[in-house]
Image (cartoon, grey):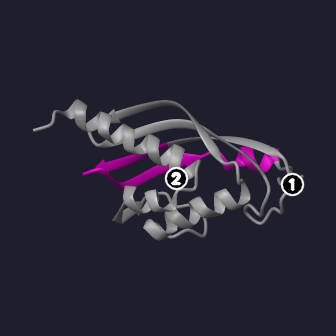
């Protein structure tokens, strides 16, 4: 029987792979491997469904808008099978994002999210992203 620390470390490794290889590398086959079929997003982004297909759609939209999209993980903490990660995403705005046409501007924004990992698969997500910061950087806020 694994101890809770082993479970936490394994869960953190899954989240790091998702951040680097799926979000940062566009490895959609790995997305399918890492996300459970019954994945549930408790905080889906606008126009995204709270399921596995919705998460994949969001990741693809982000990589289309920011082809060099990648994250720097500042820290991770695990409580059993739930991993909380604080990170900053970076990218260059090369495609439509939230209805804002490509600007060529470099952007960055912080996120804090929690993901549950069970049997090596991401089963749940809760998160907050600083999209206000992105809109400000893209000069897309009402004056």
Left or right: residue 42 compared with residue 129: left
Image point 32% across, 49% down: which residue?
A: 117
Q: Which residues are magenta?
A: 113-137
Q: Does residue 13 sit above or below 142 in this rendering?
A: above
- Does any portion of residue 51 appear in the rendered image? no
Residue topped by disc 2: 22
Seen at 46% across and 62% down, the residue is 29
The answer to whether 102 is drawn above or below residue 19 in the figure is below
Residue located 85% across and 51% down the image: 104
Distance in Å between CA atoms under marks 1 and 2: 24 Å
* Disc sitting over residue 103 in the figure: 1
What mark, if any, has residue 60 been given in the picture? none
Expressed as whole percent of the image width and height from the top left, the position of residue 69 reads 66, 48
- Position in image of residue 98 (x %, y %): 73, 63
**Crowd around label 2: few <14 · some 14–19 · many ≥20 (10 Å):** many
Q: Is 8 rendered above or below residue 69?
A: above
Q: Give the prevailing secondary structure in the magenta stretch.
A: strand
Secondary structure found at label 1: loop
Residue in front for this viewpoint, 122 or 30: 30
């Amino acid at each position: 029987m694994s101890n809770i620390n082993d479970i936490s470390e394994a869960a953190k490794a899954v989240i790091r792979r998702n951040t680097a290889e799926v979000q940062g590398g566009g490895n959609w086959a790995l997305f399918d491997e890492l996300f459970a079929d019954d994945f549930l997003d408790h905080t889906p982004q606008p126009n995204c469904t709270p399921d596995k297909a919705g998460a994949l759609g969001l990741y693809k939209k982000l990589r289309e808008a920011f082809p060099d999209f990648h994250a720097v993980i500042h820290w991770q903490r695990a409580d059993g099978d739930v991993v909380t990660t604080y990170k900053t995403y970076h990218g260059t705005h090369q495609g439509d994002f939230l209805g804002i046409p490509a600007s060529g501007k470099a952007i960055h924004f912080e996120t804090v999210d929690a993901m549950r990992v069970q049997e090596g698969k991401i089963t749940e997500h809760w998160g907050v992203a600083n999209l206000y910061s992105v809109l400000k950087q893209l000069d897309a806020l009402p004056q």
